[in-house]
Image (spheres, helix red, strand yellow):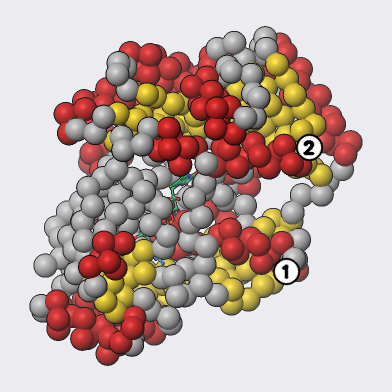
């Protein structure tokens, strides 16, 4: 089917305004926030109902045209880049809250709602959806990538907070998985399979999410350490002591310095932990803060500040969430590489040591190390003069080595960004051939014509 015919069909299934091949629309949907090469789709469509999603999928399946779902396009591994063209299905018109079950701490939403907007609306009911990736991601994109964030250490990742889904299969069939009960034991857990499938198995049209009450009392801690090793040891100390922080982030000296220069936060310029606690009472909070202080002082922290007030705490988290944008501002026009590995918490110090050693060996580039430490998750962000040789070399020197170390320590090649394009090369190593083969068979079972986000997670044959 040529492009004109495709647009005409998509417009007939939606409306004249909601299917386009305008260069600006194709361009907008050709690149996520990663540094993977852009690729334009042949058409963009904005469905407004599950029925429209279903009829578009049925058309694409008949014609063997790829569909790449699109939320906010904030992925960091090329997850939403339509590498083989085809249709980008932009879900931003499906952005409504469908039902709030406040008594059960649950909300039912369409996938195109952005989580920050959703949380603003939920705040009136004293509730929030806890997973919080730095970017203002859509719920569909968070479900598809199993996104996590600073609060995952206490509240879980997206997968832990999805109870039920409505999805459209590749052939247009609409089905539901899961239910609103928080305990579910009835057969295979398709909800958990679909969460994290990056739009390769089905298109999410509705999600029932588990919410948490906004904390009655909270307090932030900022603790600086002489070296990243001591900071990482403190992470293990805090998690190993049975404390339950609501956030536990590690930032290396370069990252803290960048934040100080940009936001004048006056942080001690050395490896630092940002920690937050949520509690039902002041007394619990005070007890937890006391224990954290003890652990940090035992590990020779060079400064410890607790009881950080709301305004200062909000500035800390804004600075933490703004790191990606900050690095781009500091290194305008440069290429960048973002890594994402995770290990069991007892191995976190070893992973941080490897990251620190790798960055110390780099010449002529700027490297930053930080991560959701409480989950054993470590990121690096490397900025470099953008030429292909640098990129390939840095992939080998940084990404390959960090992944190798994480796998050796019992961890994973991606804690939260997903596989997309960039992590496919590690899948065999992480899972082994039999498991990978089962994944391929699951993909074929759901999508025998390989039309859903072709070329992602497992690579494979593309739709025509
Ligand atoms: C500055 C910055 C900070 C970040 N920090 C974090 C972080 O802390 N933690 C974290 O986990 N991630 C982080 N990310 C990555 C990103 O925000 C998440 O992966 C997020 O889940 C992507 O959501 P999105 O709406 O942008 O999805 P998109 O990028 O649009 O899509 C993501 C994937 O979901 C699929 N998809 C989208 N909608 C649907 C749907 N309705 N049905 C089926 N598939 C769908 C797409 O095809 C794609 O494979 C960060 C990104 C940036 C730019």
Is label 2 in a helix, a strand or a loop?
loop
Q: Quadrant of the N terminus?
A: bottom left
| Left or right: residue 43 compared with residue 208 | left
Q: Are marks 1 and 2 in contact (CB under 8 Å)?
A: no
Residue under label 1: 102
Residue 330 vertical position relative to residue 445 in the rendered view, above or below: above
Q: Position of residue 400 (x, y in %)?
A: 28, 28
Q: Position of residue 167 (x, y in %)?
A: 41, 72
In the depicted view, which residue is nearer to us: 300 or 461?
300
Residue 218 vertical position relative to residue 38 in the rendered view, above or below: above
Q: Position of residue 178 (x, y in %)?
A: 52, 68
> At 45% from the left edge and 75% from the top edge, which residue is drawn?
93
Which image quadrant for residue 380? top left
> At 58% from the left edge and 38% from the top edge, which residue is drawn?
319
Considering every residue shown, the one lying at the far right of the view is: 283
Residue under label 2: 309
> At 63% from the left edge and 68% from the top edge, which residue is drawn?
107
Q: Position of residue 123 (x, y in %)?
A: 71, 61
Q: Quadrant of the C terminus?
A: bottom left
Q: Residues within 10 Å of mark 1 (few under 14, many from 20)?
A: some
Which image quadrant for residue 72? bottom left
Q: CA distance from mark 1 to mark 2?
A: 29 Å
Q: Is residue 342 visible?
A: no
Is label 1 in a helix, a strand or a loop?
helix
Quarter, ligand 1: bottom left
Count of numbered circles in the view: 2
Residue 148 vertical position relative to residue 168 in the rendered view, above or below: above
Which image quadrant for residue 106? bottom right
> At 17% from the left edge and 54% from the top edge, which residue is drawn?
460
């Amino acid at each position: 089917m040529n492009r004109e015919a495709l647009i005409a069909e998509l417009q007939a299934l939606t409306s004249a305004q909601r299917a386009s091949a305008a260069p600006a629309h194709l361009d907008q949907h050709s690149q996520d926030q990663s540094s993977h090469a852009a690729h334009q789709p042949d058409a963009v469509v904005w469905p407004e109902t599950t029925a429209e999603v279903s009829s578009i999928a049925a058309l694409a399946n008949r014609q063997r045209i790829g569909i790449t779902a699109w939320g906010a396009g904030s992925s960091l591994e090329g997850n939403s880049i339509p590498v083989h063209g085809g249709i980008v299905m932009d879900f931003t018109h499906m952005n409504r809250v469908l039902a709030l079950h406040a008594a059960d701490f649950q909300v039912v939403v369409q996938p195109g709602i952005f989580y920050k907007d959703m949380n603003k609306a939920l705040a009136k009911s004293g509730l929030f959806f806890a997973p919080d990736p730095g970017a203002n991601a859509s719920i569909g994109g968070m479900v598809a990538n199993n996104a996590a964030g600073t609060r995952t250490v206490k509240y879980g990742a997206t997968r832990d907070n999805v109870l039920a889904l409505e999805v459209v299969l590749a052939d247009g069939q609409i089905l539901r998985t899961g239910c609103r009960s928080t305990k579910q034991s009835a057969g295979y857990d398709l909800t958990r399979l679909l969460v994290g499938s990056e739009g390769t198995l089905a298109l999410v049209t509705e999600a029932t999410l588990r919410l948490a009450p906004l904390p009655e009392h909270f307090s932030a801690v900022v603790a600086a350490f002489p070296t990243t090793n001591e900071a990482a040891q403190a992470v293990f100390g805090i998690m190993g002591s049975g404390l339950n922080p609501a956030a536990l982030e590690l930032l290396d000296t370069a990252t803290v310095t960048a934040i100080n220069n940009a936001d004048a936060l006056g942080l001690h310029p050395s490896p630092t932990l940002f920690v937050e606690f949520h509690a039902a009472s002041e007394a619990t909070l005070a007890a937890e803060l006391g224990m954290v202080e003890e652990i940090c002082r035992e590990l020779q922290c060079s400064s410890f500040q607790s009881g950080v007030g709301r305004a200062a705490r909000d500035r800390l988290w804004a600075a933490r969430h703004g790191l990606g944008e900050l690095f781009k501002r500091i290194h305008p026009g440069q290429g960048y590489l973002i890594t994402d590995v995770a290990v069991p918490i007892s191995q976190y110090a070893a992973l941080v040591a490897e990251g620190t050693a790798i960055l110390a060996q780099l010449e002529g580039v700027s490297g930053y190390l930080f991560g959701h430490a409480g989950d054993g998750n470590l990121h690096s962000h490397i900025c470099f003069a953008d030429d292909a040789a640098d990129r390939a070399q840095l992939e080998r020197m940084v990404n390959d080595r960090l992944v190798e170390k994480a796998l050796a320590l019992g961890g994973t090649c991606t804690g939260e960004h997903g596989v997309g394009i960039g992590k496919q090369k590690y899948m065999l190593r992480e899972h082994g051939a039999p498991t990978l083969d089962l994944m391929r068979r699951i993909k074929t079972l759901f999508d025998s014509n390989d039309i859903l986000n072709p070329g992602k997670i497992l690579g494979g044959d593309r739709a025509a």
